[in-house]
Amino acid sequence: MICTACQKAEAVVFIKHIINNQVSQAALCSGCAAHAHIPIDPVNPFHALMDMLGKPAAPRPRAAAARCPGCSTTWAEFRSTGRFGCARCYEHFADHIRTLLPGIHAGAYAHRGKSPKRRPLNG
Amino acid sequence: MNLQGMLKVKLGWAQPEGPYHDVVLASRVRLARNLKTAAFSGRASAPALKRVREQVFAAARQTYLKDAAYLRLDELDSVDRQFLAERHLISPGLAADPGSGGAVIDPRECLNLMVNEEDHLRIAALAPGLDLRAAAQEADGLDDELAASLDFAFRRDWGYLTACPTNLGTGLRASCLVHLPGLGLSGQINKLLESLPRAGLIARGLYGEGTKVMGDFFQISNATALGRTESEIVAAVEHAVEELSRREKEARHKLAAGASRTQLEDTVYRSLGLLSQARLLSFEEACHHLSALRLGLSLGWDAPADFGGINELMIMTQPAHILMLAGKPLSAPDQAVLRATLMRRRLGRAAK
């Protein structure tokens, strides 16, 4: 089956959305799926992440900006391991991370859970 | 601390208690946390990681974990570490490569910390049966106590910052260790496991990520940690596992009724015969037959053990547990002999 988005490549992922009883279907090739941040293997988020990072559409920061000032992890290292080196990576690579998150967290992009209980002032 | 003493501990989470305990052995909630002050465990230097470990230990001593066991994993041998992994207290990965890892374990083994795995800190709480809410409450309380003295890496928009962005947000994984022989025997298991991702769930093997499925035991957990509150994630997994448990019970009763009953009885009692008579047993074989025996027990059939006894045998006959029990190195065939002896002693004499 041909990709319903680009009408060129072979489709590898088939999506069925049911929103308010309206069914919409799509069949996407790996490139269009990566572009839409849809993981090929939605079973395991880590596989989905590695899959997205391996695609040509994955973010590639320019060389100068590629090293985290906190731990000197490069974006290339993150692409190969799927792991950041320190909390500052999240600031430094924020723009790229933002585009990855919905694909690995089922469309979610923001935290809604708890925050750390503040340290007591005299502690 | 003498880990051999842990052999005598009645594992709190393996008691046959809690809702759906004939299907759900245990519920577990873990929270991933990192300190602001150091690079993540995969990146930081060994001295930095040792400082993280001491910081976490010091913080934990201020909480109700003050009477817990504090273990530096690099000071233990590989059997000890595997023993901890078999008790689900550390990950198999950390057991194989301890680095500057640590573990803090409460006396009933229901609340524990794992230090310097891929994140600086993993807080885990376990409860018997299907009771993720109880486990979540425990983990949440300990998290708050630790946050009083540890500065966790956190952003308002993305939540708790983790080494792998798949854990970002709540850092929470709610999982249940489930026993699904009925769905396995009736051929429904694959279809059901394939349907889990649609509900945002993942199935893994007995010891979690990347491990093998043995004896129809699976871990079911949430796939994503961002975008929902902790209680929403916990409620969703609990709901799904409850539904899965209902289907498993239906499948068991269907198998035990009508034409397939004799077939099932044969499977269960062959397993009992084998376990109570064999002279050599591998863990995988033991696991497979204990699974069948557990199924018979859940149908109220006569067996020389109860759920507690079978859960205990499942734990005690694991490879590192057998070595710990022997108290000395054993060759593979000798381990199989000791395992079979233990099984005969528990199931053989009492067999009618």
Image (cartoon, helix red, strand yellow):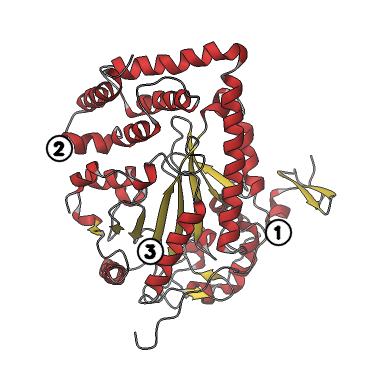
Question: What amino acid type should be assigned to the residue bearing mark 1?
Answer: His
Residue at the right extreme of this rendering: A22
- For label 1, the SS is helix
Give coordinates of residue B103: x percent, y percent. Answer: 29, 57
Residue B210 vertical placement versus B133 (above, below): above
The residue mark sitting in front, 1 or 3, is: 3
Q: Residues within 10 Å of mark 1 (few under 14, many from 20)?
A: some
Q: Is residue B288 above or below residue B122?
A: above
Circle 3 chain: B
Q: Residue at label 2?
A: B327
List x then y, in percent, for residue B56: 31, 69
Q: How many marks?
A: 3
Identify the amino acid type marked 3: Leu
Q: Residues within 10 Å of mark 2 (few under 14, many from 20)?
A: few
Give the amino acid at mark 2: Gly
* Residue A54 seen anywhere in this rendered image of the structure: no
For the residues beneath circles 2 and 1, the answer to whether they share a chain is: no
Q: Which residue is at 50% across, 69% downward? A: B160
> Distance from label 3 to label 2 (Cα)?
31 Å
Quarter residue B158 falls in: bottom right
Q: CA distance from mark 2 to mark 1?
A: 57 Å
| Cα–Cα span, label 1 and label 3 | 34 Å
Residue at (30%, 63%) from the top-left corner? Answer: B65
Location of mark 3 (residue): B121
Q: SS at mark 3?
A: strand
Compare residues B284 and B174 and report the one nearer the observer: B174
In what element is the residue under mark 2? loop
**Quarter holding the C terminus of chain A?**
bottom left
**Picture coordinates of residue B179 (x, y %)?**
49, 34
